[in-house]
Image (tube, rainbow, N blue to C red):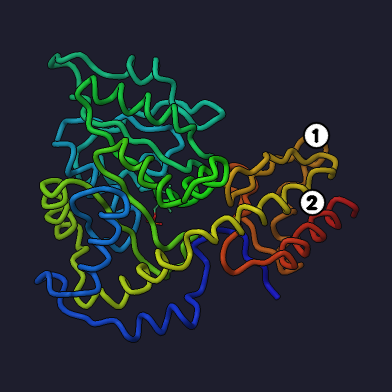
Amino acid sequence: MTIDLRSDTVTQPTAQMRESMLAAPLGDDVFGDDPTVNALQEKIAALLGFEAALFVPTGTQSNFCAILSHCQRGDEYIVGQMAHAYRWEGGGAAVFGSVQPQPLNHQPDGTLLLADIEAAIKPDDAHFARTRMLALENTWGGVVLPFDYVEQATQLAKAKGLTRHLDGARLFNAAVAQATANGTNPFHEARRIAQCFDSVSVCFSKGLGAPVGSALCGSRDFIARAHRIRKMAGGGMRQAGVLAAAALYALEHNVARLADDHTLAKRLADGLADIDGLQVEAPQTNIVFVDLAGPAKARSAELIPYLKSRGVLATGLYRLRFVTHLDVDAAGIDQAVQAIQDFFKR
Ligand SMILES: *Cc1c(COP(=O)(O)O)cnc(C)c1O
C-alpha cells in the first residue's frame, strides 16, 4: 500500500462526503442561486465572525482576490519571505494586479519581527509604493504563530493604517493545536485568531479533506470587491454546490479530528529522532520537516526515490517534508519510519 505523505491535499473524499455531494441542492452560483454555496458561505463567515464569505476554487485564488481587494495598482503588501501568498503563487498579485510584495525574513517561530514590519512601511513619498496591507500565514509550514504575536502584529498594522489578511489555509490546524494547549474548543480558537484580521482565507482541500475549495471571509463591502475579482480571475463557477457540499461536510466532521493528524506527525518525528544524520523538527501540527546533516546529506537525492520504491511518498524542495492527513494511519507512519531507518542502514 502507498503511504502518501507529500501533502494533506492528496486525500480522497470519503463515501459519506460523496453522499453529501450527491444530495446537495444546486443552482447557478453566478446568479447567486446555489443554496449549498450560500449555506457554506454563511456558515464559514459566521464561524469565523465575519459578515460575508466567498467560495473560491483554490487557496491561491482566495489570496489573490484578497490582495487585489485590499490593494490598488502601485500598492504593496508586507508578507513573509517563505509565505505562500508571496513565494508559491507564481507572482500572481504582481503579474495580474500590479501589486508589489515586500517580503520579510521569518524568525524560526514563523513570525515576522514587529520591528521589521514597522521598518518596511514606506513613508508617503512619490519614490515608494504605498504600503497597504500585512499578510500573515497561520499555520506557517505547520508552525502555529503564537497568539500573542498575532494580536501584536495585527494591532501594529492597524495602528499604521494597514489592512490585515490571514492566509489561513491551515487555520483549523492552528486552532486545533491551540485548543489542545488551552483546553478550549477549536472553533472558538479559529474565531479568536480570525478576528485579529480584516480578511481570512481558509482551505477545505487540505487537512479538512474536501476535494476542492477555499473560502475568503471579510466585511460585506470587501467580499463584494472580491466577488468582482473572482469573476475576472475566471472563478465564477456554476453548480458549485456539488463542491461546497464537500466543504460543508468537512467543516461539520473533519475539524476536531485534525488532532489525530497532529498525533501521527509526532509519531513520525519520534520514530525518526534516533537516526544518525537526521535533524527532525518537532512538529506542532501535521507537517514534519527533516534536514539531512553530515554524511547523510550527500545521500539526500537518493532518499526520495528509495522511499518511493518502498511505497512511501514525500517531497523535498527546500527540506524533506512529510505531511499527515485523513488517509494515513499509525500503520502507515510505522511503514514510513521503517523505510527511512532501512535507508540509513544500507
Ligand atoms: C495550499 C496553500 C495555499 C493555496 O491553496 P491552493 O488551493 O493549492 O491554491 C495557500 N496558502 C497556504 C499556506 C497553503 O498551504
The answer to whether 259 appears left or right of 211 in the picture is right
**Count the marks: how many?**
2
| Residue closer to the observer: 74 or 45 | 45
Percent across and percent down for residue 142 are: 54, 45
Percent across and percent down for residue 141 are: 52, 43
Q: Residues within 10 Å of mark 2 (few under 14, many from 20)?
A: some
Marked residue nearer the N-terminal end (1 or 2): 2
Residue positioned 30% across, 70% down in the render: 244
Percent across and percent down for residue 132 are: 21, 29
Q: Residues within 10 Å of mark 1 (few under 14, many from 20)?
A: few
The three-letter code of the residue at mark 2 reads: Gly
The answer to whether 180 appears left or right of 167 in the picture is right
Tag nearer the camera, 1 or 2: 2
Q: Secondary structure at mark 1?
A: helix
For ligand 1, tell me if the residue under mark 1 lies within 8 Å: no
Residue positioned 46% across, 81% down in the render: 16
- Compared with residue 228, is residue 243 higher up or lower down, i.e. above or below? below
| Residue closer to the observer: 233 or 176 | 176
Q: Pointer 1: what residue? A: 294
Which quarter of the rendered picture does the C terminus lie within? bottom right
- The reply to whether callout 1 and callout 2 are in contact (CB within 8 Å) is no
The answer to whether 166 appears left or right of 209 in the picture is left
The three-letter code of the residue at mark 1 reads: Gly
- Compared with residue 45, is residue 108 higher up or lower down, i.e. above or below? above
Q: Pointer 2: what residue? A: 271
- Compared with residue 36, is residue 92 higher up or lower down, i.e. above or below? above
Marks 1/2: CA–CA distance: 20 Å
